[in-house]
Amino acid sequence: MFVILITVTSYFAFLLILGSLLQDQPRSMYEMMRQMMYDDRSLTLVNLGSLSSAVAVGLIFSMLLKTKSANEDELKVIRRALSEDEKTVLDEVKRAGRITQDSLRFRLGWSKAKVSRILANLDNMNLIQRERTGKTYIVFLSGKETETV
């Protein structure tokens, strides 16, 4: 429904823009009437141009919406497969943006082994990334999960 609204709105916008660019502005009422009655070619061009541009905008917009909803659906399926502890870690990493593994362990109050095991699992699933820094890791969400987690 939203795509149809965008398409119709863009049609009228293109109609106004192309109409003002392609048609000569009449100087008198007589010229306006004559233009309406006899100048069908320019009106047809304006309508076809506006219609094709609006359809293109509608198609692009619908493709963008489908891509975004497909990513969200994929993430919902992935989140269903995760344990509650893995979901908790993902949520905490998302909230922090970038966090050290030690800070994550202290925030959650879990053991070093538990946090390390869960982060290794999430890293293997490409949901997070870990960068070695000294004796610990900096943890952050991987590229596409930052948009939708």
Image (cartoon, rainbow, N blue to C red):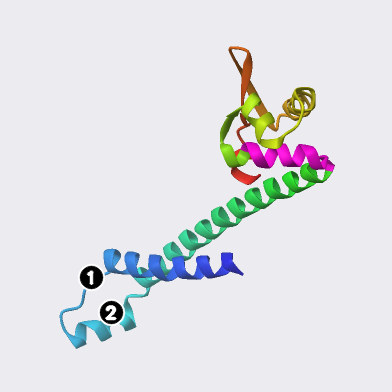
Q: CA distance from mark 2 to mark 1?
A: 9 Å
Circles 2 and 1, Cβ within 8 Å, touching? The answer is: yes
Which label was assigned to residue 45? Answer: none
Amino acid beneath label 1: Asp
Q: Position of residue 82 (x, y in %)?
A: 81, 40
Could you tell me which residue is drawn at 45 percent across and 65 percent down? 10
Could you tell me which residue is drawn at 61 percent across and 54 percent down? 65
Figure check: 144 above or below 51: above
Query: Does residue 80 appear to the left or right of 72 in the view shown?
Result: right
Which label was assigned to residue 24? Answer: 1
Crowdedness near tag 2: few (<14), some (14–19) or many (≥20) residues, C-alpha within 10 Å: some
Q: Dot 1 lies on which element?
A: loop
Figure check: 98 above or below 35: above
Q: 68 and 47: which one is in front? A: 68
Could you tell me which residue is drawn at 29 percent across and 64 percent down? 22
Could you tell me which residue is drawn at 42 percent across and 62 percent down? 49
Q: Position of residue 59 (x, y in %)?
A: 57, 56
Q: Dot 2 lies on which element?
A: helix
Q: Position of residue 63 (x, y in %)?
A: 61, 52
Amino acid beneath label 2: Gln
Mark 2 against mark 1, which lies toward the viewer?
1
Membership of 89 in magenta stretch: yes
Q: Residue furthest left?
A: 27
- Residues in magenta? 81-93
- The C terminus: image quadrant: top right
Crowdedness near tag 1: few (<14), some (14–19) or many (≥20) residues, C-alpha within 10 Å: few
Q: Position of residue 97 (x, y in %)?
A: 56, 36
Which image quarter: residue 101? top right
First in sequence, mark 2 or 1: give its number. Answer: 1
Say which residue label 2 marks: 35
